[in-house]
Image (cartoon, grey):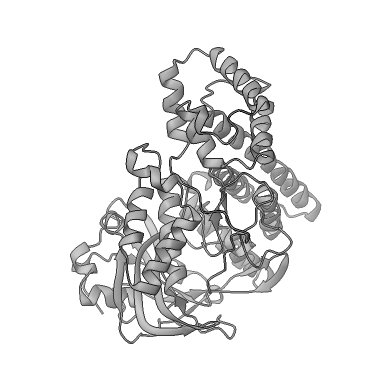
Amino acid sequence: MMNKEKGWNFDNSYERLPKSFFTSHNPTSVLAPKLIILNEPLAESLGLNVEEMQSEDGVAVFAGNRIPEGASPLAQAYAGHQFGHFTMLGDGRAVLLGEQITPSGERVDIQLKGPGRTPYSRGGDGRAALGPMLREYIISEAMHALGIPTTRSLAVVATGEAVIRETALPGAILTRVAASHLRVGTFQYVAKWGSVEELQILADYTIKRHYPDIEADENRYLSLLQEVIKRQAALIAKWQLVGFIHGVMNTDNMTISGETIDYGPCAFMDAYDPATVFSSIDRQGRYAYDNQPYMAGWNLARFAETLLPLLHDKQEQAVELAQDAISNFSKLYQANWLEGMRAKLGIFNEEIEDESLINDLLTLMEKNQADYTNTFRALTYDKREEIDLFGIPEFSQWYELWQARLSRQEESKASVQQLMRNSNPAVIPRNHRVEEALEAAVEQGDYSVMERLLNVLSKPYAYTPEKKDYCTLPAPSNQPYRTFCGT
């Protein structure tokens, strides 16, 4: 056990829930842990002693070799629809150390990803490779900088051991920080294999932890459903606005808190194409860019199904309440997306024709394979000559309509540009840049490429000269970019 001079301040409220929700379980120790990267600003915000986190004892915690004082490790049980097929799941390669209470009073989960087998491993080794763990670190921190709700990465430790996939790969453990790891799949698990009383306990716990303002509502479980729908509508709109493609939107990868979780086969879109799919296992395009809002609605419908026993004593009325709530998702999503797209184009007020103006631009971008991020970046600075669409008559016509639209609002040109700067990132984690950083780290032990990338991505809305190289597109290729789950 370790003392609190390290800064650990654990509570373990999840452990006080019914024992069927989890299994107490310690991580499996590793041979030769080595700290690869520590998120110092995040560590400080959590109340951790940064110097101690880099010590031998601190690294031992991130490796699962030591349990900090106050922690009570466990693996959570949950279920999920994976590509539409329902199955029993659980933390097969993750262990929740406990809940850190930060200096500001916030409660966050501290989870180790890749610390060995658990009772839910289903034949897996419970380990993780270095490349995918560094990938999650890069993308999750980039998402945070973009202002998108997300789990975050505190540290990555190399284990000194190999993990066997198609080949032997260097092993690693990621320390993940989350508002919680409650998922739609958590509710599916309890609804399927637990009692109504246990379902109510889970719902009450969720409300107290994430939505305390609704505790006194007349039907707090309906309010819970409505609040989760609101957060997911806002979250998915933010994904779409920056061209982020999650890749594996199974119900066990949708959090109740509204955070993005699980950065396996995710990637960012270059050329605008609504049908873009990167994941090697998504052969039918279920989780393509344009399908993400629909799949979020589908997942939320599964969440609503789990709450039916709590929504109303009569099944028919419970279903009606759930359907009414779910039907609101598309409207909420569309409102969030439209507001965000207006901001990307410097539009402050609302006109009926705005949606057509936006969709006309996207259609031109798709038809001409224009880069999504760089198009809006160039529009922000009114540098038409840098846009792939420059010189195309249809774009010139669109541009004139856009300028006329801007002239019909009171805000100054400087205000318009500032709104666009705040809404259009200069840089995103370009897929080829991420791969470049991972290759240098994993194959050569060179982490400087990743460190430079992380530094650039930490301020994505800052239009500075050093970011220019990170805006360039990858070299043309006959092979589409593919991502993998990284298990």
**Can I make out residue 38 in this image?**
yes
Kindly identify the residue that appears in the image at 36 percent across and 85 percent down. Answer: 29
Q: Position of residue 290 (x, y in %)?
A: 68, 47
**Can I make out residue 68 in this image?**
no
Kindly identify the residue that appears in the image at 67 percent across and 32 percent down. Answer: 359
In the rendered image, which quarter contains the N terminus? Answer: bottom left
Which residue is farthest right? 316
Q: Is residue 225 left or right of residue 377?
A: right
**Number of numbered discs visible in the structure rendering:** 0
User: Where is 436 relative to 321, above or below?
Assistant: below
User: Where is 389 relative to 261, above or below?
Assistant: above
Q: Position of residue 273 (x, y in %)?
A: 66, 46
Q: Quadrant of residue 21?
A: bottom right
Q: Position of residue 213 (x, y in %)?
A: 49, 44
Q: Is residue 91 left or right of residue 355?
A: left
Q: Foreground: 397 or 353?
A: 397
User: Where is 389 relative to 459, above or below?
Assistant: above
Q: Is residue 333 left or right of residue 165?
A: right
Q: Foreground: 164 or 229?
A: 164
Q: Foreground: 227 or 477?
A: 477
